[in-house]
Image (cartoon, rainbow, N blue to C red):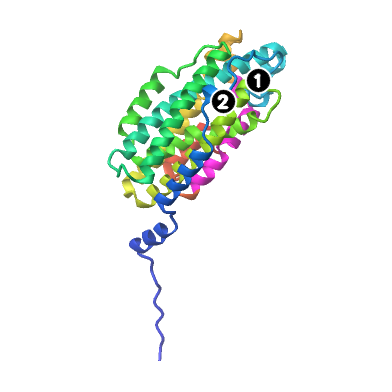
């Protein structure tokens, strides 16, 4: 007698059911985040000493994280000019942070518009929006305290973001949210314990790191859910839009006007930053945890992966 062995195939509904089984309960995640928010939230207006004078001889950003660090141009700069560049880059990053957070607040409002207003998921989204309002005001005060100008993104990127926040689908919104949060968060985790840096900057980054950890958790859990439940076309759109956002982000990360404002040749400075192996390593290290997560949940595929590589954020 001949025994016939049949292969067991896993159907798409089976795979979806298995993937859903690995997801954490949305309400339980939100309840934990609400509890953490109640215990570890700050009012920057009262938490930080905004009236204290700036400290002589201190950086506004760790030198190793300044864009020109270890380039030929950096080696020619005086220590005073290097510190001045750190002051302007801190203001540029704070300006970028405000831009991202304003976009994020609008994306969160769109996300919860059709959801139950009494759910913990919606209550946490509203809590996060309140956090982001405080963060944006805090960053603006830090720019003013450092007596540097605000550095808006280019008109093109400003208008691209206008389109994004209007038409972005839910998984795309959370993927872009993580892009805006996690790289800056990595840099701020190196900044707040660094005693070489101005006390007010360390205080700002400490508050942001503590509160942003909840925002990252919320966005990661929701993006993981969306990449399981969204239709295939939306998953593909998320891969492309996230990759394009990474490309734009890498260009907009430091406004090149900072180089002009500290007396450097803008074109030469931009070229040296692009050629800098140290800068590439910093940006890829900052994006490392994020790209590992995005790869794990299936975002870094196809055209999206190519766009991430072209951004310089993915090795």
Q: Would residue 195 be counted in the magenta stretch? A: no
Q: Mark 2 points at which residue?
A: 47
x and y, in percent, of residue 255 in the image: 51, 18
Q: Where is residue 109 in the image (x, y as percent from the top left)?
A: 34, 34
The disc label shown at residue 198, or none: 1
Query: Visible in this render: residue 76?
Result: yes
Query: What segment carries the magenta color?
Result: 272-295
> From this viewpoint, which residue is outermost toward the left?
114
Label 2 residue SS: helix
The numbered mark, 1 or 2, whose residue comes first in the sequence reads 2
Q: What element carries label 1?
A: loop
In the picture, which quadrant includes the C terminus? Answer: top right
In the image, what residue occupies the spot 39% across and 17% down? 155
Q: Position of residue 238 (x, y in %)?
A: 38, 41
Q: Position of residue 171 (x, y in %)?
A: 38, 42
Check residue 279 for magenta coloring.
yes
Cα distance, mark 1 to mark 2? 16 Å
Residue drawn at (39%, 31%), measured in percent from left and top? 105
Disc 1 vs disc 2: which is toward the camera?
2
Front-lying residue, 26 or 225 = 26
What is the crowding at mark 1: few (fewer than 14 residues within 10 Å), some, or many (at least 20)? Answer: many
Res. 278 image quadrant: top right
Main SS type for the magenta part?
helix
Q: Which residue is drawn at 41% across and 80% down?
A: 5
**Residue 116 against residue 14 in the figure, above or below:** above
Task: Answer yes or no: is residue 241 visible.
Answer: no
Across the whole image, how many numbered discs are drawn on residues?
2
| Residue at far top of view | 263
For the N terminus, the quadrant is bottom left
């Amino acid at each position: 007698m001949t025994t016939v062995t049949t292969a067991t195939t896993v159907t798409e509904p089976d795979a979806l059911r298995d993937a859903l089984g690995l997801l954490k309960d949305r309400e339980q995640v939100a309840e934990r985040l609400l509890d953490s928010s109640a215990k570890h939230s700050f009012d920057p207006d009262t938490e930080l000493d905004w009236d204290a004078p700036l400290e002589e001889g201190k950086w506004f950003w760790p030198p190793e994280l300044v864009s020109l660090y270890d380039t030929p141009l950096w080696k020619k700069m005086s220590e005073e000019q290097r510190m001045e560049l750190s002051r302007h880059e801190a203001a540029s990053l704070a300006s970028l942070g405000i831009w991202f957070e304003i976009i994020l607040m609008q994306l969160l409002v769109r996300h919860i518009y059709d959801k139950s207003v009494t759910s913990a998921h919606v209550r946490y989204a509203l809590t996060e929006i309140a956090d982001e309002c405080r963060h944006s005001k805090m960053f603006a005060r830090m720019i003013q305290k450092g007596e540097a100008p605000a550095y808006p993104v280019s008109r093109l990127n400003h208008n691209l973001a206008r389109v994004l926040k209007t038409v972005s689908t839910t998984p795309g919104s959370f993927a872009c949210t993580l892009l805006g949060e996690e790289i800056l968060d990595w840099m701020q985790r190196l900044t707040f314990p660094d005693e070489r840096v101005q006390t007010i900057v360390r205080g700002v980054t400490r508050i942001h790191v503590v509160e942003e950890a909840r925002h990252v958790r919320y966005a990661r859990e929701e993006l993981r859910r969306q990449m399981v439940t969204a239709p295939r076309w939306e998953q593909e759109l998320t891969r492309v839009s996230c990759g394009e956002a990474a490309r734009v982000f890498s260009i907009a990360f430091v406004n090149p006007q900072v180089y002009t404002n500290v007396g450097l040749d803008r074109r030469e400075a931009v070229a040296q930053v692009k050629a800098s192996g140290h800068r590439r390593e910093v940006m890829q290290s900052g994006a490392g945890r994020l790209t590992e997560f995005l790869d794990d949940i299936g975002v870094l595929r196809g055209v999206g992966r190519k766009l991430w590589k072209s951004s310089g954020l993915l090795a």
